Amino acid sequence: MYDLPVTPHLATGGHAVRTTALLMTAALALALCAGAHAQQKTSSPWEYSGYSQKEYGSYKSFSAFVEMSDGVKLAVDVHLPRKGPKRDKFPTVVEYTPYSRAYINPAFALLDGTGRTNLMGGEGAVIPNPFCLSKTLLENGYAVVIADIRGSGASFGSRLDLMPRIGGDGAELLAWIAQQPWSDGTVGMKGASYMAMSQILTAARKPPALKAIFLMVYPFGYQDLYPGGVYSQGFMNEYSKLLKQMNSNLLKADGAMFPIMPTAPAADEDGDGKLLDEIPIDKNGNGTFTDDYAYPEDPNDPPQYEDGQPRQHLYFLATKQHAGNQDLNAWMSAAQFMDTTGADLGFDDQWSGIDGYALSPIANVPAIMESGIPIYHLGGWFDAQPRSATLFFATAKNTNPSKLLMLPGYHIIMSPFYEYFGDNQQKYMDMIGREQLRFFDRYLKGIPNGLDTEPPVTLYVMNSGLRQEQEWPLARQVPTDYYFADGGALAAAAPAPGSAKYKADLSHDSRFGPNKGNRWLMFIIPPQAPDRAELDKKCLTYTTAPLERDTEVTGHPIVEFWAQSTAPDGDFFVYLEDVAPDGRAILISEMPQRAGFAALHDNDAMILRGAARVNVKPELPWHGYEKAHYDPQVFASGAPVKLTFDLHPTSWVFKKGRRIRVSLAAADWPTFNLHPALSPANDPASPGNTVPTITILHGADHPSHITLPVIPADSQVSR
């Protein structure tokens, strides 16, 4: 057994206690850390002044281990405001991450070209995770705590991502924070993606100190990894590799999605003020140190260090335990149904009873609604899961003080669409940092800044601007049907009976640009607004005549069509586009759907099979996605099959003279896996493929159409 250091050590390198200047890079600005300008007393998403002010000019940092009830120790970095009014206690904002609370440069070469060299403080300099450390909050008198989730960073333990235990750890961590001498007992949480999901899992435990959560661009359940029942292999393949590389604290990571560095150790065991020498020697030079020593199984083969000093090997032992993490891609790619359990996958241990319901963050919604905790939801119209924010907001707004901000961002929040609209992206990055400050000022400091009395919804209406609303979906929306018709027409009235045949093209690939990005890949975004004009040549398309007036669509588009296929099953990918007079077809929204899941079920069942009796809003098509809900021979009888599903929510103004297009494809490879009945090899070029002919029916008996939530022109007022 080993003993932990009694005195926490500095996370920012250098000396036992030192002050770190507020050095932030552009990455930190993109990490939502812009400040509010103290001018007049104003509070809105556009401006915040007179309620809160920058009081601190620097901060001090230290690290600690926090022991969980099962003995696993989490590594945390505590950052406290400095050089300002003398206060002993602060409200605290927490980021709870699997992506390292701080990084360390094992060699200067690893930093070449990353734009982070200005943060180095000499040998062993530590870089606090720039997407977690908020300059704005520190300047305004908040403590910031960044913690490594178990099985990651410098924390001990192992995990299956999104397992309930992560929430239990989070609640215990917050209880520890509330008891610290520098804490005033109030805690908030913030973060994007996984760090939003960790908030959800923690908030469901109802920790007394937790007063507010700020959720950004987050997945919500099974349907986000299997949208429409189709596995998102392009993202998951690379993401699982990235997680393994990061959690292994590799000294070099060839083939990573982007440059990564090992996590900073949380303990300066030899007390020399340096952290770099806490990393064991990589004897074989392969970029990892855990395979170089047989310790602790063989006590005679302990890790070795550059300085030769004795240690308890905390960093080595923690990293070695991470090898017990379950590979999320291996699990999810095999768990193709919501009710697939760990036992179904061959696990007979702690994972055996876990299924897609338990691993869905949405399973925690009932407990969060019971808690009444205030929630801020930030979504991106071009994120892979914008519906998470709109659904959670609409479902919980009557039980939890709730805010919703939707911007035209991708998963990393940035987006080429700001430039497409002639707008300034940085203005909205600043807005996000300002909204975090407003939110925590209101609910952690109790400042009556009006955030809770203004309209709760702020939308970036694309091709128009920002607008505040009272609800989502908008009560004044007018569901408007556009019907599929012969000749590729998209008509306002139901057409005469007819049909269109489409020979499936399994090579259809929705990625754009030189970097091959799209919304589903999350970390890889197109450099320009995606133009599908060329891709549509591989699809079946339906297009309106030029619009006679501007037409705003804000809400959840729903597509419904009748299909036949020469194959027993198949996948459909539907795209909503804005077609310019020059032929450019800008992608607005999309969604895949596996035909075998055609049957509809109560959408309340997406939360724990409906056992929680939560009324999930808005009412949207839900396909169950359990094994019993799937029909692998859905087309075998030859009868037309009706498919009804929603596309990603959006808010877009189709300008006068533009056209609305709906395009249908039968594949999107390699972003999604090919249907195994069509391509057992999951390869569009495989000679063993079945390439079906698909028929889409039109007319009164089979009124295939898309329903768009149109907003009356006289009610559109954007700022």
Image: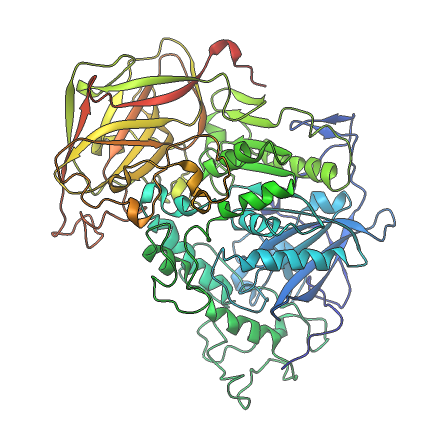
Above or below, 497 against 164 in this view is above
Depth check: 622 or 107 in front? Answer: 622
At x 38%, y 21%, the residue is 708
Q: In which quarter of the image is residue 53?
A: top right
What colour scheme was applied to this rendering of the protein? rainbow
Outermost residue toward the right in this view: 86
Query: Can you say whether 82 is above or below 453 in the image?
Result: below
Left or right, residue 262 beside residue 608:
right
In x, y percent, where is residue 334?
Answer: 32, 57
User: In front here: 360 or 529?
Assistant: 360
Q: How far across and down, in percent of the image, does residue 165 sit?
A: 55, 60
- Depth check: give the residue in front, 584 or 361: 361
Residue 214 visible in the current orientation: no
Q: Return the x and y of residue 167 as percentages of the image width and height.
A: 58, 55
Task: Count the marks.
Answer: 0
Q: Position of residue 34 (x, y in %)?
A: 66, 39
The quadrant of the picture occupied by the C terminus is: top right
On screen, residue 26 versus residue 528, left or right, reads right
Residue 528 in view in this figure:
yes
> In which image quadrant can residue 540 be found?
top left
Classify the position of the N terminus by image quarter: bottom right
